[in-house]
Image (cartoon, rainbow, N blue to C red):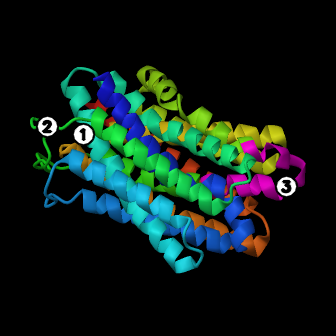
Amino acid sequence: MLQLALGGLLALAIAMGIGRFMYTPLLPFMEAGLGLSKSEAGLIASANYLGYMIGALLAASPFLPGSRRAWMLLGLAVSALTTAATGLVSDMWPMMSLRFFGGVASAFVLVFCSALVVTRLSMGGFARLTSLHFAGVGSGIVLSAVLVSILASFGVDWRQMWLVAGGVSLIALLLVSHLVRADATAPSGSGLVTGRAPPMLWILIVSYGLFGFGYVITATFVVSMVRSLEEVRSIEPIIWLVVGLAAAPSVWFWSIIARRMGLIAAYAVAFIVEAVTIAIGIFSPTITGLLVTAVGLGGTIVGITALGLMAAGDLSRRDPRLTMALMTASFGLGQVVGPTFGGVIADRTGSLALPSLIASAVLIIGALLVFWRLTVEHRQARRH
């Protein structure tokens, strides 16, 4: 089972950490090389997130033939190829198209890999290894940051960086295919609905979309933000690395919090922590303030992702693939809006401060929504 969890970790590291988040540390190099405005950079990011949302909806279809493992490996292959191909184009539409299909592939990997790995771990009595699986996102962010830093130190340009990242992803695909073996006994289709979904599940789906919007503006532009401020520019090479280092153990950390206060309550608290740390970087754009933002961002995005998916799985009366797909689609919708919104507002105001503060406020709204529903359910339980 450890081998399975490690395979899941590697799959998420490649599809999410590189396939999705490689764009963040590479963005300053692309802005310099292509003369991208914040609006254009936001559109490219939104294309990826639109693909992510559509990919999640497709992954929920009960009519997809084949096994979860086959779709996961296909997603990894497409993610690797679109990552490499991004280094071969310069125009907006081809780049947006590649990022779109890369987003579809990332969603397929997250949905099918998570449904496969989490189900097998739970059936085998190794549910605690789920945190190792979800740590793949943070590990992938670390990998993308280290990869960009090393390549930049050798004077490699942004095009070659994308090509190298694609090559690394293809190698990882071979490893994942070895670690995550086919299992004929694992369910591959969508399960039957056994009852109406509880209200809290819908609250989780809505709040997960608010999370997608709330985190993505900072996650997309944090490296560019540091580069634009002369007094903190010295931490540009490490800011995304700090995000990844904080993200890698975050699922383990939030799992401990969840055992003490409950899964859903911990999920909402993580929203507040992320909102506050984002605001700190805006009100205090110093090295210390921005490092706090990086730690807070990394320390919550993967934790919220894992807690949200696990809580939704517990509440669902459906096949876990469908539940994870609905959550991921909601998340993707928030991400589609976020980068474009942030880029347009930043171009008009000359700063990322206002869109970041709005994103922080949206995270607070998401937390309040969850706490409201918890309060309602607590009162209902006391009456009975």
Distance from disc 2 to disc 1, alpha carbons, whole Å, reads 8 Å
The amino acid type found where label 3 is placed reads: Leu
Q: Which residue is mark 1?
A: 116
Classify 44 as above or below 143. below
Kindly identify the residue that appears in the image at 40 percent across and 66 percent down.
101
Residue drawn 45% across the image and 20% down it = 260
Q: Are marks 3 and 2 in contact (CB under 8 Å)?
A: no
* Magenta span of residues: 217-237
Residue 186 is marked as 2
Image height check: is 371 above or below 128? below
Coordinates of residue 190 in the picture (x, y in percent): 14, 50
Secondary element at image label 1? helix
305 in the magenta segment: no
Magenta residues: mostly which secondary structure? helix
Q: Amino acid at mark 2?
A: Ala
Residue at image coords 57%, 78%: 92
Amino acid type, callout 1:
Leu
Find disc 3 in the rendering and name its residue: 229
Which one is earlier in the sequence, the residue at label 1 or at label 3? 1
Quadrant in which the N terminus appears: top left
